[in-house]
Image (cartoon, helix red, strand yellow):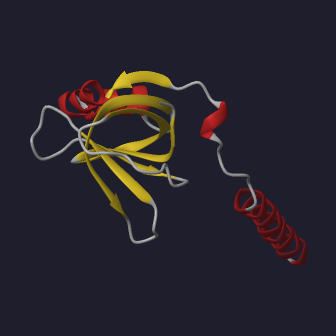
Amino acid sequence: MKSKKKIALIVVLATILFGSIYGYYMWNKPARNVAGEKGLEITAIAIFDSFNLSEQRANALYLNKAIQVTGEVTETKQNQAGETVVYLKSNDPLFGVNCTFKENPGTIAKGSTITFKGVCTGFLSDVIINQGIIVK
């Protein structure tokens, strides 16, 4: 009976130890650097239409991948964290592509065409892209 308790205790302690090591590794993992990655090139209209048509298929193609998006700026805002968020035009009058930049991209005029690279994180009425950097 005592040997079963010892084995169970060793298994529990080993699980806690390996879980702690994995948690420490994940917590200290360096942030992804999109600047060094080759992005899939696409227009804002095309990526929005892809998600609007079949979110599941678009997730398989774009989710958590570096993408390079070109489109017309409809709006620029600051989010609550003070980061710049740029909205690009799509075929839908209410929704489009939004990109949060990791560094201030400077002045971006409404109506201008820009190209940026970032990580696609999904679709919530807009296509969401984070860690954006200006390409053109």
Horizontal side of residue 11 vs 48, given as left or right = right
In-front residue for pair 4/44: 44
Q: Residue at x 90, y 72 (%)?
A: 3
Report how many numbered discs are placed on residues in the image: 0
Position of residue 32 relative to residue 51, above or below, is below
Spot occupied by residue 50 in the image (x, y as percentages of width and height): 26, 27
Residue at (49%, 49%) from the top-left corner?
Answer: 105
| Position of residue 30 measured from the top left corner of the image (x, y, whole percent) | 73, 52
- The residue at the far left in this view is 93
Asked if residue 46 is positioned above or below residue 133 in the image, the reply reads: above
Q: Classify the position of the N terminus by image quarter.
A: bottom right
Residue appearing at x 9%, y 41% in the figure = 93
Seen at 81% across and 62% down, the residue is: 21
Left or right: 97 as drawn, with respect to 20:
left
Residue 91 in which image quadrant = top left
- Say above or below: 99 vs 43: below
Of 51 and 77, nearer the camera is 77
The quarter of the picture where residue 59 lies is: top left
Q: Tell me if residue 99 comes above or below residue 23 in the rendering.
A: above
Q: Residue furthest top?
A: 41
Q: Position of residue 108 (x, y in %)?
A: 37, 46
Q: Looking at this view, is 10 or 37 the one in front? A: 37
Query: Is 130 left, or right, of 74 in this rendering?
Result: right
